[in-house]
Amino acid sequence: MRAIRLWQKLPNVQAPDALFPRLATGRLTLREIVMSDAPALLATHGDREAMRWLGSDSITSLKQAEAMVTIFAGWRKPAVSGVTWAIVRNRDHRFVGTCGLFVGTGAGSQTCPL
């Protein structure tokens, strides 16, 4: 698998789960968020101005970023039915953000048949 070999070449980067949905374009790859992404997650989710557009508070510590990695992994359980990807730029493998997809189950949620 090309993706696993790529991760083996990068220092201090955990290999993604082989079963996690991975999407790629010419410029970007969406992959599993792993614990070694925590410093980059802190940089993106620690930006108060950027986080106001996501509707959640910014984080302030590496410990909080590590907790987010664990939370994101837990969202893949059937009771929650969601996934959050790391957005990685292909040319330099830089973590540039996150995106997610979730089944709406809260008040006011709507579904759309595909």
Image (cartoon, grey):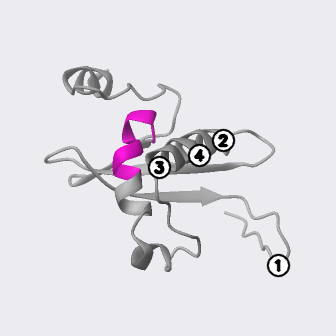
Place of residue 42 in the rendered image (x, y in percent of width and height, measured from the top left)? 40, 54
Place of residue 81 in the rendered image (x, y in percent of width and height, measured from the top left)? 72, 48
On the question of residue 23 being in view, the answer is no
Residue located beneath label 3 in the image: 85
- Residue at 50% x, 41% y: name it: 66
Residue located beneath label 1 in the image: 108
Using the image, tell me which numbered label, if any, was put on residue 72.
Answer: 4
State the extent of the magenta-drawn residues as a range: 33-41
- Residue at 81% x, 44% y: name it: 79
For marks 2 and 4, give the one nearer the viewer: 4
Question: Label 1 sits on what residue type?
Answer: Gly
Q: Is residue 50 above or below residue 104?
A: below
Q: Secondary structure at mark 4?
A: helix
Q: Is residue 101 above or below residue 76?
A: below
Q: CA gap, disc 4 to disc 1?
A: 23 Å
Q: Are marks 2 and 4 in contact (CB under 8 Å)?
A: yes
Q: CA gap, disc 2 to disc 3?
A: 11 Å
For marks 3 and 4, give the one nearer the viewer: 4
